[in-house]
Image (tube, rainbow, N blue to C red):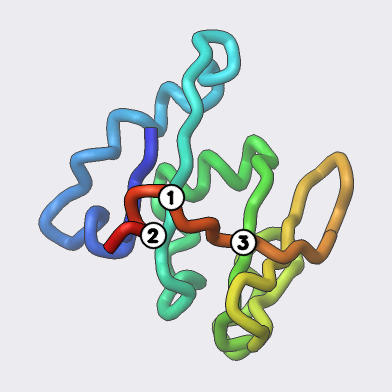
Amino acid sequence: MLIDDYDLVATQQGNPAAPLAQMLAQASDVGMHVIVTRRTGGASRAAYDPILQGMTDLGVTGVLLSGNPEEGQLIGRVKPILSEPGRAQVVSRARGLQVAQLAYVRSVHETEE
């Protein structure tokens, strides 16, 4: 399951993804993969959201792209940093902090345009 722009999904009016929070601990048992994306702005305030808190408690791997360090620690003790496009900080319990470069490859259909 991919939840893009989570900061627009989880609002004061409700969160349609909220029922997933109680299923996160069993996700690997049932083959469910959950990917949540959001902008870094305001992310530290959203840390207590049930889904994000559940993912933090389970120690899922997180990827931080470029962002304002003033947001504070977002994944474990890792703060976002200003970086080049595609440069990422990958945080996992097993491997700690690693730096990665993400790439975008155009599909055949996109190159025809």
- The picture quadrant where one finds residue 72 is bottom right
* Residue closer to the observer: 71 or 66: 66
Front position among marks 3 and 1? 1
Picture residue at 11% right of the left edge, 57% below the top: 13
Q: Indicate the amino acid at tag 2.
A: Thr
* Residue closer to the observer: 99 or 108: 108
Instruction: Provide residue 41's location: percent of width, then percent of height.
Output: 43, 80
* 23 lies left or right of 101: left
Instruction: Provide residue 43's location: percent of width, then percent of height.
Output: 46, 70
| 31 w.r.t. 39: above or below | above
Q: Are marks 3 and 1 in contact (CB under 8 Å)?
A: no
* Residue closer to the observer: 79 or 65: 65
Q: Indicate the amino acid at tag 3.
A: Ala
The residue that mark 1 highlights is 107
Name the element at disc 3.
loop
Picture residue at 48% right of the left edge, 74% below the top: 40
The residue that mark 3 highlights is 103
The residue that mark 2 highlights is 111
Instruction: Measure how far apart labels 2 and 3 are at the Cα level.
Output: 16 Å
Residue farthest toward the front in the current orientation of the protein: 112
Sequence order check, earlier mark of 2 and 3: 3
User: Tag 3: Cα neighbours inside 10 Å, few (<14), some, or many (≥20)?
Assistant: few
Name the element at disc 1.
loop
| 69 w.r.t. 94: above or below | below
Q: Indicate the amino acid at tag 1.
A: Ser
User: Tag 2: Cα neighbours inside 10 Å, few (<14), some, or many (≥20)?
Assistant: few
Q: Are marks 2 and 3 in contact (CB under 8 Å)?
A: no
Q: Are marks 1 and 2 in contact (CB under 8 Å)?
A: yes
* 95 lies left or right of 87: right
* 58 lies left or right of 2: right
